[in-house]
Amino acid sequence: MDIREYNRIAWDRQVEFGNPWTIPVSAAEIGEARLGRWRILLTPTKPVPRAWFPDLAGLDVLCLASGGGQQGPILAAAGATVTVLDNSPRQLAQDRIVADRESLTISTVEGDMANLHMFDDGSFDLIVHPVSNVFVPDVCPVWAEAYRVLRPGGVLVAGFTNPVRHLFDFELGERTGVWQVVHALPYSDPASLSDEEKRRLAEAGEPIEFGHTLEDQIGGQLTAGFVLTGFYEDRYADEEEDILSRYTASFIATRAMKP
Ligand SMILES: C[S@@+](CC[C@H](N)C(=O)[O-])C[C@H]1O[C@@H](n2cnc3c(N)ncnc32)[C@H](O)[C@@H]1O
């Protein structure tokens, strides 16, 4: 199964469906960002602390697997030179729609977060990587490539899922009201789902997911050479929509520096 091709089609369909992570920011948010009043998300609800960011003016920023017209346009309006890389043409089109609407300059690049061959070593000062490595089978190459394309002193801010989310079958839990531990970690949709479940996922236009271990998410950044300088957890605000959020935070954000 070609995961990247499958997820390209799935995320293009998510744009059609109006998935919240495909909805571009408003003109009002861009106006505020131009005045220095901005915030972005890496995880469902908690804004990234402003202290995590260097002064954005003139900074080369890569929004990694971050299409959808959200982080990229805000950071461009706040003064950064922004490149958005994503696997979904429709998600990248959302960034171009905001750029055209607001007269912002944003480069959009279709590609794989795990292979940034189109960028030279040391091309960026800041990488913004919201929850999206759940859509690739191996996260370690993502950290290695992020490290390579950052300049020394550069910063990587990343959001990712706590693997605890993947212990459960959400569809089963919602249908039966009984939440059981059914999957082993690390988790993989292709390896764990039955053919029937995969068929239903494809029909619904849902992307394929992977639940990486914390060893790969956090240890992987350290192995790539990063020094971790910030950490927080997050959860969905609507605990009815996301039952697990009643019990625990299940998203993580980290700030890491390339020495
Ligand atoms: C949840 S959305 C994140 C973007 C959003 N701006 C946000 O605020 O979180 C996940 C994104 O990852 C992208 N993606 C999935 N697999 C990818 C890959 N292999 N390489 C690059 N982007 C990928 C999807 O196309 C989608 O735009």
Image (cartoon, rainbow, N blue to C red):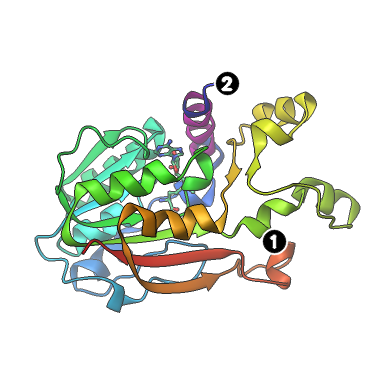
**Element type at marker 1?**
loop
Using a 10 Å C-alpha cutoff, classify the residue at mark 2 as few (fewer than 14 neighbours), some (14 to 19) or many (20 or more). few
Give, as a three-letter code, the residue at label 2: Met
Where is residue 252? Give x, y as percent.
51, 65
What is the number of callouts on the image?
2
Q: Residue furthest front?
A: 223
Name which of mark 1 and mark 2 comes first in the sequence: 2
3D distance between C-alphas at marks 1 and 2 = 29 Å
Compared to 226, does 175 lie above or below? above
Tell which quarter ligand 1 is in: top left
Where is residue 224? Give x, y as percent.
33, 52
Where is residue 100? Give x, y as percent.
22, 43
Residue nearest the viewer, comparing 140 with 119: 140
Quadrant in the picture for residue 76: bottom left
According to the image, label 1 marks what residue? 242
Where is residue 80? Give x, y as percent.
16, 59
Q: Quadrant of the C terminus?
A: bottom left
* The label number, if any, that marks residue 1 in the structure image: 2
Q: Please name the residue shown 47% across and 74% down the image.
A: 232
Residue 22 left/right relative to 26:
right
Q: Please name the residue shown 89% across and 57% down the image.
A: 178
Q: Which residues, given as a range, are shown in magenta?
A: 5-15
